[in-house]
Amino acid sequence: MSLERYDLDAQGIPIDCQDTKLLYVSSAKFGGDWHSMMHTHAFTEIFYVVGGQGQFKIENLVYPVATDDLIVVNPNVNHTEVGLNAAPFEYIVLGIDGLDFTAGAEDEEDRFCILNFHNRRDEILNYLRSMLWELEQKSAGYITICQNILEILLIHFMRRTDFAMTPTQPNVKSPKSCAAARRFIDGHFKEHISLEQLAKLVHFNKYYLVHAFARQYGISPINYLNARRIDESKRLLVSTNLSLSQISNLVGFSSPSYFSQSFRKLEGSSPMEYRKSNEVRMDSASARS
């Protein structure tokens, strides 16, 4: 019989992930000559190249990337990814709020980092694909599992680089940007508005916009948009004889059925039930006067 015991040293923990939040995980595969527009995020992104070859444009410089490269882009760094004709460009990307990567030496790059994990490909891909699977299945506790996997990946990353991970300061752009998105919705809710359009307006990634807007106002941008449309539809239901189809079109819903579904979800009754109940109240008020 043999027994070995290893006591844990709390001082050996390299980072504190309590304030670090996984915003999203996405996978993408593109053909040659694909590229997106230069853009920035108010959070950190980590890309892992699953296959193919491509380029990363970071500020005014271009860097070649290939299979098993891991690219970390810090908040507010202008960047984009570019596919090449040689092979389809496939990667998995994580959006991470609350964490910044800083160089260990003053002369090192602190806007981004490119590493290669060829020797640990199977292990890294297993973690990343486990995240994707959890997010697809959405079983009980999936967010906690994804957050824990993120912390494991960050520790593996720390073992391969001299970069330090530090909590980011609250982004001062978020409240102003969210307010700008809200003002746009208030002024244009009768028009077609997409999440992509709002994100482009305030120069946010759409996933981060949802996160920041909900944190600021307690509701997602699209749900806020629908609520504004429902408020206007209630006024029209009571003050006009317009049909549901006409009202649905006037306030910006894509179809009468979606209008009715959204109305019932927010008000607990159908548009026609709301109209009839208000007609009864108005008739009663007129009779009393």
Image (cartoon, grey):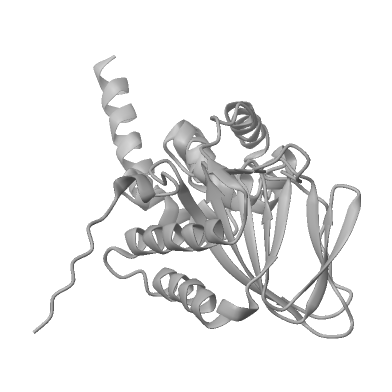
User: In which quadrant is the N terminus drawn?
Assistant: bottom left
Q: Nearer the viewer, residue 200 or 185?
A: 200
Image spot of residue 128 (x, y percent): 51, 72
Q: Is residue 247 in view? A: no
Residue at 24 percent of width and 17 percent of height: 288
Q: Nearer the viewer, residue 192 or 150?
A: 150
Residue projecting furthest to the front = 2
**Left/right of residue 250 with respect to residue 263 in the rendered view:** right
Residue at 38 percent of width and 43 percent of height: 18
User: In which quadrant is the C terminus drawn?
Assistant: top left
Image spot of residue 27 (x, y percent): 61, 72
Residue at 37 percent of width and 50 percent of height: 12
Q: Nearer the viewer, residue 36 or 187?
A: 36
Q: Nearer the viewer, residue 49 or 166?
A: 166
Q: Which image quarter: residue 142? A: bottom left
Residue projecting furthest to the top = 289
**Left/right of residue 31 with respect to residue 172 in the rendered view:** right
Image spot of residue 274 (x, y percent): 35, 43
**Left/right of residue 16 with respect to residue 42 in the rendered view:** left
Number of callouts in the render? 0
Q: Which image quarter: residue 76? A: top right
Q: Which image quarter: residue 3? A: bottom left
Residue 145, above or below 27? above
Q: Is residue 61 in view? A: yes
Residue at 88 percent of width and 85 percent of height: 86
Image spot of residue 218 (x, y percent): 41, 36
